[in-house]
Amino acid sequence: MPNWHTEHEAGLTTGQRAADALRNGMGSWPFIGIFITLMGVWAGVNTIALKDGSWDPYPYILLNLFLSMLAGLQGAILLIAAKRQDSISAAMAKHDFDTNVASKTEIDRLLQLGEQHLQMITELTELVNAFATSAAARA
């Protein structure tokens, strides 16, 4: 059954989908584990291969360059993801507001119906009492 969230997702652009995928990937424990493992392997391989001529000897300048580029990209990606999250939150707030307005209308209608029922019960009670009084007076 389609709802507003599936309709919202269907209208996303490729860039918005990519931002969501990157946010979900970079904000996960598997990403952190893989990242730490790769950094350890890089340092280990270059330390062991130091005698044979490693491609990035200590203090790992090339690794530092890659990490700086990654940090710059991650900052931009996280800003894009935050912007996307704001738009999702705004869509959810609008949906909540629309739901609340519809609920208020329905509650008002039910209250009005309850008032009508109360008025009808009051009138019926008065009619029954009047009938009982007239029947008692005739008897």
Image (spheres, grey):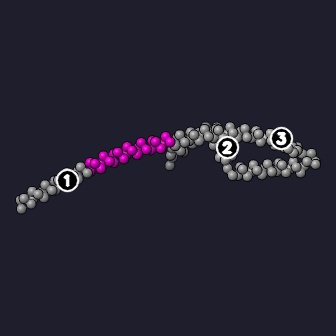
Q: The disc labelled 3 sits on which kind of residue?
A: Leu
What's the residue at 70%, 41% (across, down)? Answer: 74
Q: Is residue 114 magenta?
A: yes
Q: Range of the magenta residues?
A: 93-117
User: Upstream in the sequence, badge 2 or badge 1?
Assistant: 2
Nearest to N terminus: mark 3 or mark 2: 2
Query: Residue at the spot x=77%, y=42% of the render?
Result: 67
Report which residue position mark 3 lands on.
62
Mark 2 — residue?
22
Distance (Cα) linking label 3 and label 2? 24 Å
Which secondary structure class fits the magenta region best? Answer: helix
- The alpha-carbon separation of the residues under discs 2 and 1 comes to 68 Å
Give neighbour class at mark 3: few <14, some 14-19, many 20+ (Cα, 10 Å): few
Percent coordinates x, y for residue 75 in the rendering: 69, 39
Would you say residue 37 sits in the magenta stretch?
no
Q: Quarter of the image containing the C terminus?
A: bottom left
- Picture residue at 93% right of the left edge, 48% below the top: 52
